[in-house]
Amino acid sequence: MSKPLSKGPEWGTFLLILSCYGLWFAALALLPDVSLFLTIIVTSALVAFHSSLTHEALHGHPFRSKALNETLMAAQLNMAIPYNRFRDTHLAHHKDESLTDPYDDPESNFLDPAAWREMPRWKRRLYRANNTLLGRILLGPMIGQCCFLVSDVRAAWRGDRSVIWAWALHVPGVVMVVWLISQTPMPFWAYCIAAYLGLGLVKIRTFLEHRAHDQIDARTVVVEDRGPLAFLFLNNNFHVVHHLHPGVPWYALPKLYRERQSDFSSANEGYIYPSYRDVFRRYFLRGKDPVSHPLWHSGE
């Protein structure tokens, strides 16, 4: 794994974190009197942006102090995923030799073909719908959260202290977020919709980040986008660059890609899309991958 580019604080990223919190509260406090619909849309984008900032923090930004980064991001605006669990599962995901493995990659969207064959028909339809981009945005947060909670409940029941501690630390952050919401005109039910949509926006990024491939580096995508979604995702659309150099901060990823574009293209065997517009055009209503892992054996 590569190390961060600098040893000092990354003040630009720190200011983005402060701005995210400030804009989030301002949106809740000021926008409901203008339009509740607008408030939900803006808040959902800020929830997604906070998730991108959380991703930066768990990779060692903006400060070298792990405790300071975790404190900054402790109040998870989505209310659904404890920081420590996001950190632990995501760092496990960075074991690239396990990418897309239905069991060893915590962020895999593939299922064991044997489990797929045993699924009831209604559940198969649900997962197939989830494999379209529209389905991933609308159904992905629900499916992902249900699977995540079931896994964590089982781990906690077995006595996994790291999981229990993560959720214990999560509670004060959720209480703070709920209390702040209560100080604004934003109805809590509307905030829950915004939080869900924020998780759905993140699913646009994760939708095709990894494919099934026998070559490890070829499993990870690049979306050569520099528009609003790229900023919302803090350039994590240059995903193979991030996986090969996980310590590099968000603002340096596009430059690193430009300087070594042929190397990255060779590494991921041309798994490249020109923009998110192209991704929407291809997969908004059409599945990109099978649900069962295609390299294990056929389960479709």
Image: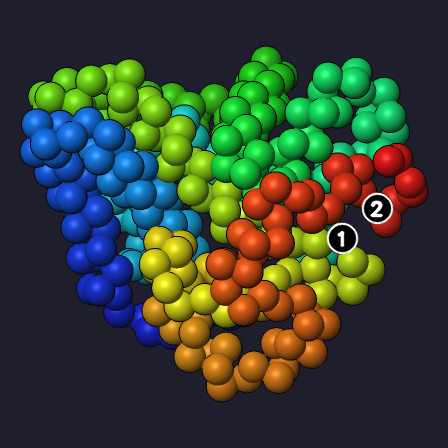
Indicate the secondary structure of the residue bearing disc 2: loop
Amino acid marked by disc 2 = Pro
For this orientation, the residue located farthest to the top is: 157
Instruction: Tell me if mark 2 has few (under 14), some (14-19) or many (20+) residues whose alpha carbon lies within 10 angstroms of its own.
Output: some
Q: Do the residues labelled 2 and 1 touch (CB within 8 Å)?
A: yes
Question: Looking at the image, is 23 positioned above or below residue 163?
Answer: below
From the viewer's perspective, tell me whether residue 45 is left or right of residue 222: left
Q: Residue 180 in the image: x percent, y percent? A: 15, 25
Can you tell which mark lies on residue 212? 1
In the picture, which quadrant includes the C terminus?
top right
Can you tell which mark lies on residue 294? 2
Total labels drawn: 2
Spatial CA span between label 2 and label 1: 7 Å
User: Can you tell which quarter of the image residue 134 is in?
Assistant: top right
Question: Looking at the image, is 45 positioned above or below residue 214?
Answer: above
Upstream in the sequence, badge 2 or badge 1? Answer: 1
Residue at x 62% of width, y 68% of height: 272
From the viewer's perspective, tell me whether residue 7 is left or right of residue 145: left
User: Can you tell which quarter of the image residue 74 is in?
Assistant: top left
Can the viewer see residue 158?
yes
Q: Residue 154 in the image: x percent, y percent? A: 62, 17
Residue at x 61% of width, y 62% of height: 221
From the viewer's perspective, tell me whether residue 72 is left or right of residue 122: left
Q: Residue 44 in the image: x percent, y percent? A: 31, 37
Can the viewer see residue 245?
no
Question: Looking at the image, is 109 positioned above or below residue 142?
Answer: below
Residue at x 55% of width, y 60% of height: 278
Amino acid marked by disc 1 = Ala
